[in-house]
Amino acid sequence: MLAAQLICRTLNQVLILAVCTLCCHLALAQQSSREGLFVVQKDGKSGFIDRTGKVLIPIQFDSANNFHEGLALVTMNGKKMFIDATGKIVFNAAYDIINNFSEGLAAVNLGQTRIPNIGLISNPGKWGYIDKTGKLVIPMKFTHAEDFSEGLAAVTNGDRDHGAFIDHSEKIIFTLPLDVTLGFHEGFAGVLLSGNVTYYDRRGQKMSVPTEYGPRSHSFSEGLVPIEINGKTGFMDQNGKVAIAPQFEDVEDFSEGLAPVKVGSKETTWCPRDSSGSREGFTMKWGYVDKSGKFVIPPQFESAAPFAEGVAVIHQCGEAFFIDQTGKTVLKADFRYASSFSGGLARIERETTSGWMSGYVDKSGKIVWQSPKSAN
């Protein structure tokens, strides 16, 4: 029984970490593309283009991350290294795991191993932090280390009961048990432990939260954060007060003054019939509310993302398109998938007579880059 409980707890932690990691990656990818360079792939290799589609750094790497704070992590011939915006190698990075730079530091790991075919961590190894010259500035002594945000980073030393937030000088600001955190955003950090999230300010003071909040991956955005009460979702302000009453089936973060929310509908929206004559429909619909909770764009979409750079991407009936803040469709083509705009471009996927293609589109609808979609 004890072994089963430990396995379940570990699985839970891994799932929470996966959710948080995905969110962090999405946020960081959006940030990095604003630096003017975008990762592209061709024939199994990676390189970088600018927002016009011009290749600025040759497509030569085995893999590449987006740029963060002027540096990008790439691999070539089995070696990991950071390059600058000209493609010049700044330093080699001989670590097992290397995070992107955040606030001038990058978390690095040696020795982490996972159980084959399962993915659970069998040995956490040791984590530390390097600076932009590759120098190890915070020693390899943590069993868990996260990116810096608003001057602080979450670490653990031994197990989750020995967690803390440290500053850039490695000074412990406050201690607390943790599995993983969402980092600091707008002065508060969401800390996940045993499937629940609690919010702390920079002094380590716990916020009183009127909710049965589960392991969701939201941080404060524009002063509000999603909460769940009695199976319905709304928003809480930074004083721990309910700002928009829980009434929705699901929500996303506020961005540019609006938030996507999902509600049930008695009417089914039917998608076009496919080649076999069958079709799908949906009754759960997304729209957008303002900070008073009033619908600005009525619920009508199958899926909706937060606004970015003035537009929001909608996925519906197997296609993707973009709307403005009035709900008007402003960009629509034969996209099957699209990301939010960042740095003037959005990543898209489309199906052509030559097969699946992936690339980038600008706001005029021009596809500035496309290549066959990788099998990965």
Image (cartoon, rainbow, N blue to C red):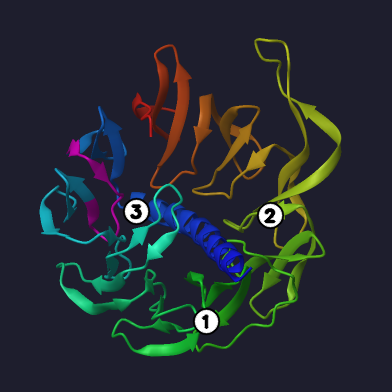
**Residue at figure coordinates x 60%, y 64% from the top left:** 4
Residue 99: image x %, image y %? 31, 61
Extreme residue toward the front, this view? 1
Q: Which structural element holds mark 3?
A: helix
Q: Residue 132 carries which label?
A: none
Q: Earlier in the sequence, mark 3 or mark 2?
A: 3
Over which residues does the magenta segment extend? Answer: 58-73
Residue 163: image x %, image y %? 45, 82
Count of labels shown?
A: 3
Say whether residue 199 is magenta. no
Residue 235: image x %, image y %? 71, 66
Q: Which mark is residue 177?
A: 1
Q: Which amino acid does label 1 sit on?
A: Pro
**Residue at figure coordinates x 17%, y 60% from the top left:** 94
Q: Mark 3 points at which residue?
A: 32
**Spatial separation of the CA atoms under disc 3 and disc 2:** 25 Å
- Relative height, residue 149 to residue 60 (above, below): below
